[in-house]
């Protein structure tokens, strides 16, 4: 993707994010006046508010930076949204079981291993990464109730927050000739892999 095309794509993403955020705000405003436990900020920040969201997000961001020309495309954003929706559907069967934390931890471990190994990421793989990231986040997404409007708010808020975080990650300066930066990113991926593996082992132990 050329620089001007990349800039245009980012502008379009910002427009989509603003529309989605407007939806979250409007639906929050027009809901009945009850005591809400999950506010707008919590919905947008859910992907970075705990280890089960932060680990897959961090390792996915490190992997997406392994692209030849790191960028987010509209198909990648759509794959993320589809993954979030599927994960949110799976949450119905996973809630309260050890499999609920196992899903994001397994995905984070796989992402961490690939990033630590320094694997290159082609365009198709980037779509799969975004979809799996959405799946891992959706499986642990919190909503105030199981009503459609609350589920839509949580999904839209998480999509905006995740997409913003990924945009920041892929647009940061690349390592290039700075070998120390590439090594640093692989070290972060290795530590993330280790943490996810330990947490996954603890989860597996609780299933025995």
Image: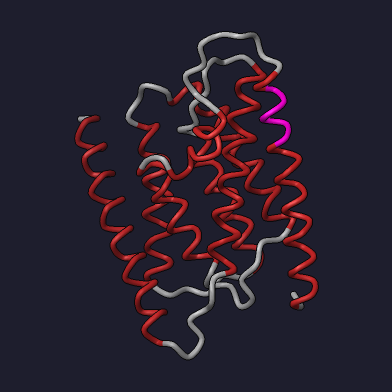
Question: Any magenta on residue 50?
Answer: no
How many numbered marks have been drawn onto this rendered protein structure? 0
The quadrant of the image that shows the N terminus is bottom right
Can you tell which quarter of the image residue 201 is in?
Answer: top left
Residue drawn at the location 68% of the way across and 51% of the way down: 77
Position in image of residue 47 (x %, y %) = 48, 42
**Percent coordinates x, y for residue 102 in the rendering:** 36, 39
x, y percent for residue 44: 55, 38
State which quadrant residue 160 falls in: top right
Q: Nearer the viewer, residue 88 or 207?
A: 88
Q: Is residue 147 left or right of residue 113?
A: right
23 part of magenta stretch: yes
162 up-or-down from 111: above or below: above
Residue 76 point in image, percent of width and height: 67, 55
Secondary structure mostly seen in magenta is helix
* Protein image colouring: secondary structure
- Residue depicted at 60% across the width and 34% down the height: 86
Q: Answer left or right for 47 relative to 147.
A: left
Residue at image point 47% right, 52% down? 57
Front residue (pair 30, 121): 30
Q: Which residues are magenta?
A: 22-27
Reply above or below: 12 against 172.
above
Would you say 34 lies left or right of 195 here?
A: right
The answer to whether 199 is drawn above or below residue 10 in the figure is above
Q: Quadrant of the C terminus?
A: top left
Q: Is residue 52 above or below residue 111?
A: above
Q: Quadrant of residue 31?
A: top right
Which residue extends farthest bottom?
Answer: 177
């Amino acid at each position: 993707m050329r620089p001007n095309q990349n800039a245009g794509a980012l502008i379009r993403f910002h427009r989509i994010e603003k529309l989605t955020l407007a939806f979250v705000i409007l639906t929050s405003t027009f809901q009945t006046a009850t005591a809400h436990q999950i506010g707008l900020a919590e919905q947008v920040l859910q992907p970075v508010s705990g280890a089960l969201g932060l680990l897959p997000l961090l390792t996915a961001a490190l992997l997406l930076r392994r692209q030849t020309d790191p960028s987010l495309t509209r198909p990648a954003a759509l794959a993320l949204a589809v993954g979030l929706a599927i994960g949110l559907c799976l949450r119905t069967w996973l809630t309260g079981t050890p499999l609920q934390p196992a899903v994001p931890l397994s995905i984070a471990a796989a992402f961490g291993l690939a990033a630590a190994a320094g694997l290159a990421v082609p365009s198709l793989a980037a779509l799969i990464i975004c979809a799996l990231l959405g799946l891992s986040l959706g499986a642990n997404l919190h909503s105030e109730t199981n009503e459609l409007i609350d589920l839509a708010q949580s999904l839209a808020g998480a999509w905006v927050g995740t997409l913003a975080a990924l945009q920041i990650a892929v647009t940061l300066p690349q390592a290039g000739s700075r070998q120390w930066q590439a090594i640093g990113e692989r070290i972060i991926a290795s530590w993330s892999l280790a943490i996810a593996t330990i947490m996954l082992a603890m989860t597996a132990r609780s299933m025995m």
